[in-house]
Image: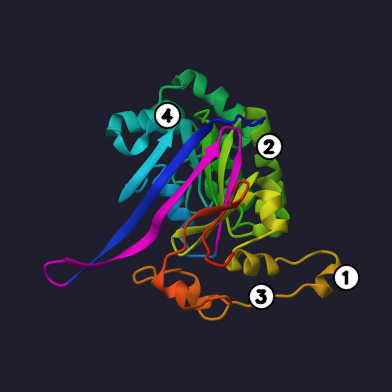
Amino acid sequence: MMDTAPLLQVKGLVKHFPIYRGVFQRQVASVRAVDDITFDVTRGEAFGLVGESGCGKSTAGRTILQLYKPTAGNVIFDGVDLTKLSDEKLRRMRRRAQMIFQDPYASLNPRMTIGQIIAEPMLVHGLATHKEVTEKVKEYLRIVRLNPGFASRFPHEFSGGQRQRVGIARALALQPDFIVCDEPISALDVSIQAQIVNLMEELQARLSLTYLFIAHDLSMVRHISHRVAVMYLGILVELSDREELYNHPLHPYTQALLSAVPVPDPAVQKNRKRIILQGDVPSAVNPPSGCRFRTRCRLAQALCAEQTPAWREASAKHWVACHFA
């Protein structure tokens, strides 16, 4: 069950990566990966963040957890602003907010056994003694549907889906309230993706977890998320309840994304109109003036180059940034 109080509030979050050139390494520009995004995540909610590759989704997730220090903005987690915490206080707070990484092959230390990988965060945060940790590792392996006997094996002995289950077990080991799921299924076979998403849904209900679910697969996001935000070139362009967004998309970019999602009914698919976006995503170093989507938008007019569209509530709890939505 979802509570109405927000567990996470992201306010005006900005993350720019400086670009240095020359002998003296002067800053000549910056990559505007995340450029002023604002949203909140309710306790017990699965909040979807979608957009094409390079739009800043993963950077946003890592900046929220302070793995990257934000350039500006605030991240308020359960009433505490993470951007203002000292390193020691942030380390203690990290117990409550964990991450499942995108690549199950790169996110596990190949020199550690599965048992050591899951045990390490518990030992670091003092949640278990060396005597207790063996039984706890077996318990978490059972929770993610892996054989407890696998604890003595190394990551290279497992498939991608099994490794991702280990990553989930590692995140759960600290009994967190909030988990950032950074495209946790994109590196997996399609046959395994549904198993992992079903497992994550089951764990959310069982352990009262709150998710920020980052993905570019819109059909999977619809399956797991309660609300969905659409991101383009570092900014949010639309945010709404799941069904409202998928049935009544307002932003031209969201409409184009949804038109590309196949429908299993041939009769419906035959009558759908595909919206093909022209051109490539502009550079995050030098984004377009006004509306960032205008260079690829079929509705673009002179106003779009002159004014940045306001982030407004077009209908009840349906936010959009577009002059013509």
Does 95 appear above or below 22? above
**What residue does disc 2 label?**
145
Give yes or no for contact between labels 4 and 1 (Cβ–Cβ under 8 Å): no
Estimate how packed mark 4 is, as few (under 14), some (14 to 19) or many (20 or more) residues with alpha carbons within 10 Å.
Answer: few
**What residue does disc 4 label?**
79
Q: Secondary structure at mark 2?
A: loop
Estimate how packed mark 3 is, as few (under 14), some (14 to 19) or many (20 or more) residues with alpha carbons within 10 Å.
Answer: some
Which label sits in the foreground, 2 or 4? 4
- Residue type at mark 3 is Ile
Measure the C-alpha gap from mark 2 to mark 1. 39 Å
Mark 1 or mark 3, which has the lower sequence index? 1
- Residue type at mark 1 is Ala
**What residue does disc 1 label?**
267
Inspect this view and state whether residue 122 appears: yes
Estimate how packed mark 2 is, as few (under 14), some (14 to 19) or many (20 or more) residues with alpha carbons within 10 Å.
Answer: some
* Mark number, residue 275: 3
Inspect this view and state whether residue 148 appears: no
Q: Is 202 or 155 nearer to us in this picture?
A: 202
Range drawn in magenta: 22-51
Q: Position of residue 77 (x, y in %)?
A: 44, 34
Mark 2 or mark 3, which has the lower sequence index? 2
Give yes or no for contact between labels 4 and 3 (Cβ–Cβ under 8 Å): no
Give yes or no for contact between labels 2 and 4 (Cβ–Cβ under 8 Å): no
